[in-house]
Amino acid sequence: MKTLSKLHTIATCAGLAMAVCPAPEVMAAGHAHSAADRKVEQLIRLIDKDRSGQVSKEEFLQFMGEEFDRIDADKSGTLTRTELSQSVIVGGGRKHPGGTSK
Protein backbone atom coordinates (compact mmCIF):
# COMPACT_ATOMS: atom_id res chain seq x y z
CA MET A 1 0.00 0.00 0.00
CA LYS A 2 2.86 2.42 0.74
CA THR A 3 4.18 1.92 -2.79
CA LEU A 4 0.76 2.73 -4.24
CA SER A 5 0.51 5.87 -2.10
CA LYS A 6 4.00 6.91 -3.13
CA LEU A 7 3.22 6.38 -6.82
CA HIS A 8 -0.02 8.33 -6.46
CA THR A 9 1.86 11.20 -4.84
CA ILE A 10 4.54 11.15 -7.52
CA ALA A 11 1.85 11.24 -10.20
CA THR A 12 0.18 14.16 -8.40
CA CYS A 13 3.45 16.08 -8.25
CA ALA A 14 4.09 15.33 -11.91
CA GLY A 15 0.66 16.74 -12.71
CA LEU A 16 1.49 19.88 -10.77
CA ALA A 17 4.73 20.24 -12.71
CA MET A 18 2.92 19.80 -16.01
CA ALA A 19 0.30 22.37 -14.99
CA VAL A 20 2.88 25.17 -15.03
CA CYS A 21 4.07 24.37 -18.56
CA PRO A 22 2.64 26.73 -21.17
CA ALA A 23 0.96 25.31 -24.27
CA PRO A 24 3.16 25.05 -27.40
CA GLU A 25 1.10 27.71 -29.15
CA VAL A 26 1.84 30.14 -26.31
CA MET A 27 5.55 29.41 -26.67
CA ALA A 28 5.34 29.92 -30.45
CA ALA A 29 3.59 33.24 -29.95
CA GLY A 30 6.71 34.66 -28.30
CA HIS A 31 5.61 34.43 -24.68
CA ALA A 32 8.57 32.24 -23.72
CA HIS A 33 9.49 34.38 -20.73
CA SER A 34 6.30 33.94 -18.77
CA ALA A 35 6.39 33.00 -15.09
CA ALA A 36 5.34 29.48 -16.03
CA ASP A 37 8.19 29.16 -18.51
CA ARG A 38 10.69 30.37 -15.92
CA LYS A 39 9.34 27.74 -13.50
CA VAL A 40 9.76 25.02 -16.13
CA GLU A 41 13.34 26.13 -16.79
CA GLN A 42 14.01 26.06 -13.05
CA LEU A 43 12.61 22.53 -12.80
CA ILE A 44 14.74 21.36 -15.73
CA ARG A 45 17.88 22.78 -14.10
CA LEU A 46 16.93 21.08 -10.84
CA ILE A 47 16.07 17.66 -12.29
CA ASP A 48 18.42 17.37 -15.31
CA LYS A 49 21.43 15.69 -13.67
CA ASP A 50 23.39 15.10 -16.91
CA ARG A 51 22.80 18.70 -18.07
CA SER A 52 21.46 17.58 -21.45
CA GLY A 53 18.73 20.22 -21.40
CA GLN A 54 16.10 17.49 -21.23
CA VAL A 55 14.72 15.41 -18.37
CA SER A 56 14.83 11.66 -18.85
CA LYS A 57 12.29 9.39 -17.21
CA GLU A 58 15.07 8.08 -14.94
CA GLU A 59 16.06 11.61 -13.88
CA PHE A 60 12.44 12.57 -13.28
CA LEU A 61 11.63 9.49 -11.21
CA GLN A 62 14.84 9.83 -9.20
CA PHE A 63 14.08 13.48 -8.46
CA MET A 64 10.49 12.78 -7.47
CA GLY A 65 11.52 9.92 -5.19
CA GLU A 66 14.15 12.08 -3.49
CA GLU A 67 11.71 14.98 -3.23
CA PHE A 68 9.05 12.72 -1.71
CA ASP A 69 11.51 11.38 0.87
CA ARG A 70 12.75 14.90 1.66
CA ILE A 71 9.32 16.37 2.37
CA ASP A 72 7.82 13.30 4.11
CA ALA A 73 8.76 14.80 7.48
CA ASP A 74 7.21 12.07 9.61
CA LYS A 75 8.45 9.29 7.27
CA SER A 76 4.92 7.85 7.08
CA GLY A 77 5.13 7.04 3.38
CA THR A 78 2.33 9.52 2.66
CA LEU A 79 2.29 13.29 2.30
CA THR A 80 0.02 15.67 4.13
CA ARG A 81 -1.01 19.01 2.66
CA THR A 82 1.55 20.68 4.91
CA GLU A 83 4.33 18.37 3.81
CA LEU A 84 3.45 18.71 0.13
CA SER A 85 3.47 22.50 0.45
CA GLN A 86 7.21 22.23 1.25
CA SER A 87 7.99 20.73 -2.15
CA VAL A 88 10.01 22.73 -4.64
CA ILE A 89 7.46 21.52 -7.21
CA VAL A 90 4.72 23.67 -5.66
CA GLY A 91 6.98 26.58 -4.72
CA GLY A 92 8.30 25.52 -1.31
CA GLY A 93 11.53 27.40 -0.84
CA ARG A 94 13.69 24.72 0.73
CA LYS A 95 16.67 23.34 -1.16
CA HIS A 96 16.37 19.94 -2.84
CA PRO A 97 19.42 17.70 -2.34
CA GLY A 98 21.85 18.14 -5.22
CA GLY A 99 19.88 21.00 -6.74
CA THR A 100 19.19 24.65 -6.36
CA SER A 101 16.72 26.36 -4.11
CA LYS A 102 13.76 28.39 -5.28
Image (spheres, rainbow, N blue to C red):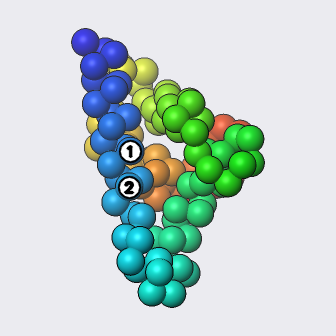
SS class, disc 1: helix
In the picture shown, does residue 28 fall above or below 18? below
- Bin the neighbour count of mark 1 within 10 Å (Cα to Cα): few under 14, some 14-19, many 20 and up: some
Q: Position of residue 46 (x, y in %)?
A: 63, 49
Amino acid bearing label 2 = Met
Residue matched to label 1: 14
In the picture shown, does residue 39 fall above or below 70? below
Depth check, front residue: 89 or 31: 31
Pointer 2 with pointer 1, Cβ within 8 A: yes
Q: Quadrant of the N terminus?
A: top left
The residues tagged by marks 2 and 1 sit, at their Cα atoms, a distance apart of: 6 Å
Can residue 70 be seen in the rendering of this structure?
no
Position of 89 compared to 3: left or right?
A: right
Q: Position of residue 16 (x, y in %)?
A: 35, 52
Position of 25 compared to 53: left or right?
A: left
Q: Residue at x 46, y 46 (%)?
A: 87
Residue matched to label 2: 18
Position of 41 compared to 91: left or right?
A: right
SS class, disc 2: helix
Q: Position of residue 86 (x, y in %)?
A: 45, 47
Q: Residue at x 38, y 55 (%)?
A: 18
